[in-house]
Amino acid sequence: MRSLHKALVRWDDLDAMSHVNNAKYLTLAQEARFEWSFYSHVSKGEIPGILEMVVARAEIDFIAPILQGGFFVDVELWVESIGNSSFVMGYEIKSGETIYARIKSVQVGIDKESGKSRPLEASERAFLEKYLEVKS
């Protein structure tokens, strides 16, 4: 199952080349991931799905430039795989039929006390499995 989120492309996201700066795509993905993993649950009085994680790797395929600010794009996200202490997420940033970027990130569960990776908890795995899309 994919999760759909709206993300605002701000006017100040545009760079000197009059398109959205490459680093801003990761910000759009991050905002959608925060909504997915935390805010959408807390706002309904639910326990967040997974909270203590960091990005260990991110890669972006730029498909089409975003040439304006001041509008919302859709960010679809899903889980591609789940490991012992990490999971891989996929994202598509798009508007209508136009896909602007595809992103992949590796998230690692972190112990806040030690700052080191930790195994994912059963409740986190159950949450992640709801969004797992296995490639055929």
Image (cartoon, rainbow, N blue to C red):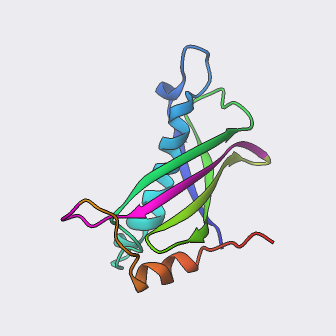
Main secondary structure type of the part rendered in magenta: strand
**In the image, is 41 to the left or to the right of 71?**
left
Residue at horizontal 57 percent and vertical 79 percent from the top = 129
In the image, 53 versus 13, the foreground residue is: 53
The boundaries of the magenta stretch are 98-114
In the image, 2 versus 102, the foreground residue is: 102
Q: Quadrant of residue 69?
A: top right
Residue at horizontal 51 percent and vertical 42 percent from the top = 26
Q: Residue furthest left?
A: 113
Q: Quadrant of residue 101?
A: top right
Residue 98 lies, with reference to residue 79, above or below; the image says above
Question: Picture coordinates of residue 120 (x, y %)?
Answer: 41, 76
Residue at horizontal 74 percent and vertical 38 percent from the top = 63
Question: Picture coordinates of residue 25 (x, y %)?
Answer: 55, 39
Question: Picture coordinates of residue 65 (x, y %)?
Answer: 69, 30
Quarter of the image containing the C terminus?
Answer: bottom right
Residue 130 lies, with reference to residue 34, above or below; the image says below
In the image, 25 versus 58, the foreground residue is: 58
**In the image, is 33 to the left or to the right of 117?**
right
Quarter of the image containing the N terminus?
Answer: bottom right
Q: Residue furthest top?
A: 16
Residue at horizontal 62 percent and vertical 42 percent from the top = 60
Q: Is residue 133 magenta?
A: no
